[in-house]
Image (cartoon, rainbow, N blue to C red):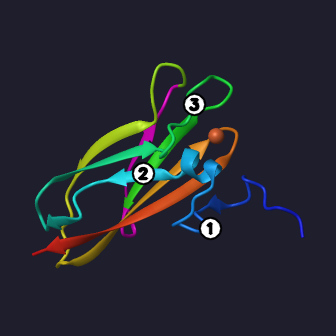
């Protein structure tokens, strides 16, 4: 069996409690309160990754997308050299409570697309 290429689909953590160095450099990190209130704005900060990814012309993070559940929220584009792969977005969850899933997807120009998620509790 051959190793899966980085550009074949979306890369996700194989073993979340024991990340590889490649996963540490590419998985989006989602920072937000663990519990939010429905209808009230809250901040979501996304960075790539636990080990900051390089932002050089030849190798950099091109963009990150944020989803709340099935809803696309935003895409942030990054320019190498002049930026770092980190963005804070203020969003509102308008559901009926329970659990909401934040999903961040980023693309490295050398190592493909990577996804991470975070569950948040939503108070009514
Ligand atoms: Fe990379």
Q: Position of residue 14 (x, y in %)?
A: 62, 67
Classed neighbour count for the residue bearing mark 2: other residues with Cα under 10 Å, few (<14), some (14–19), many (≥20): many
Ligand 1 has an atom within 8 Å of the beta carbon of the residue at disc 3: yes
Distance Cα–Cα, label 2 vs label 1: 16 Å
The answer to whether marks 1 and 3 mark residues whose Cβ atoms lie closer than 8 Å is no
Q: Magenta stretch?
A: 68-79
At x 21%, y 64%, the residue is 93
Question: Ligand 1 is in which quadrant of the figure?
Answer: top right
Q: Position of residue 112 (x, y in %)?
A: 66, 48
Classed neighbour count for the residue bearing mark 1: other residues with Cα under 10 Å, few (<14), some (14–19), many (≥20): few
User: Is residue 55 shown above or below 112?
Assistant: above
How many numbered discs, if any? Answer: 3
Local secondary structure at mark 2:
strand
Tell me the quadrant of the picture where the C terminus can be found: bottom left
* First in residue order: circle 2 vs circle 1: 1
Q: Position of residue 62 (x, y in %)?
A: 55, 37
* First in residue order: circle 1 vs circle 3: 1
| Residue pointed to by mark 2 | 29
Residue 78 falls within the magenta-colored stretch: yes
At x 43%, y 64%, the residue is 117
Tell me the quadrant of the picture where the N terminus can be found: bottom right
- Kindly identify which numbered label has been placed on residue 117: none
At x 13%, y 68%, the residue is 38
| Residue pointed to by mark 1 | 14
| Residue pointed to by mark 3 | 54
Q: Main secondary structure of the magenta part?
A: strand
Give 123 or 76, whichever is nearer the viewer. Answer: 123
Distance Cα–Cα, label 2 vs label 3: 15 Å
């Amino acid at each position: 069996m051959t190793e899966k290429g980085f550009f074949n689909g979306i890369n996700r953590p194989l073993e979340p409690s024991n990340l590889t160095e490649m996963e540490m450099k590419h998985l989006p990190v989602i920072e937000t309160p663990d519990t939010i209130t429905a209808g009230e704005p809250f901040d979501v900060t996304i960075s790539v990754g636990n080990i900051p990814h390089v932002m050089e012309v030849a190798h950099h993070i091109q963009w990150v997308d944020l989803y709340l559940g099935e809803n696309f929220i935003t895409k942030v584009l990054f320019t190498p050299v002049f930026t770092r792969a980190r963005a804070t977005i203020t969003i509102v969850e308008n559901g009926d409570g329970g659990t909401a899933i934040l999903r961040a997807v980023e693309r490295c120009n050398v190592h493909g697309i990577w996804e991470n998620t975070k569950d948040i509790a939503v108070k009514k």
